[in-house]
Amino acid sequence: RNVLKKSVGGDGEREWSFGMFDCFGACRACLFLMLCPLLQFGRNASRLKYIDRRGLPHPEGRSCLGADCLLFSRSSACIVHTQHRGELRERYNIGGSGASEFCTGCFYMPCALAQESRELALEESALLGQ
């Protein structure tokens, strides 16, 4: 699940495939993430669950939403996001810690959601042979 063949450290972990602030390269997507982080979180969570269960990309792609959106309220956003981001890090053997993920979610959530979405998109493309 290291589609871009990022170098792996001695601990078996690697960096994210895209930088935290790479989201600013796509203004439209960045604006969506700033205005609707709840929807992007739901999409990311739904896509990850589908890949875990079926080994295939979600057939509804980027339009999928689920009950995960309901968990993601202003009061619990950082906590729920920290857990989800940790699951992604574990799946892709990406370095980091719960504390760093919590801070990332609290201060840079739209950028983090974009980074996570792009990581998922890489696996989805690989599963489809693209």
Image (cartoon, rainbow, N blue to C red):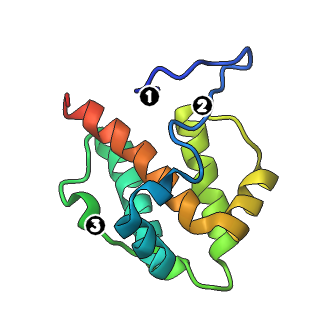
Question: Mark 1 to mark 2: distance in Å?
Answer: 8 Å
Q: Position of residue 55 (x, y in %)?
A: 30, 38
| In the rendered image, the vertical position of residue 13 relative to residue 108, given as above or below | above
Are dots 3 and 1 in contact, CB under 8 Å? no
Please report the residue visible at 28 percent of the width from the left and 43 percent of the height from the top: 54
As drawn, which residue projects farthest toward the right? 99
Q: Could you tell which of marks 2 and 3 lies nearer the N-terminus?
A: 3
Q: Which residue is mark 3?
A: 64
The residue under label 2 is: 93
Q: CA distance from mark 2 to mark 3?
A: 25 Å
Q: Nearer the viewer, residue 115 or 47?
A: 115
Front one among 76 and 67 = 76
x and y, in percent, of residue 83 in the image: 64, 58
Question: Which of disc 1 and disc 3 is earlier in sequence?
Answer: 1
Amino acid type at mark 1 = Arg
* Quadrant occupied by the N terminus: top left
Q: Which residue is mark 1?
A: 1
What residue is at 28 percent from the left and 31 percent from the top?
Answer: 126
Callout 1 touching callout 2 (CB < 8 Å): yes
Tell me which label, 1 or 2, sits earlier in the chain.
1
- Secondary structure beneath dot 3 equals loop
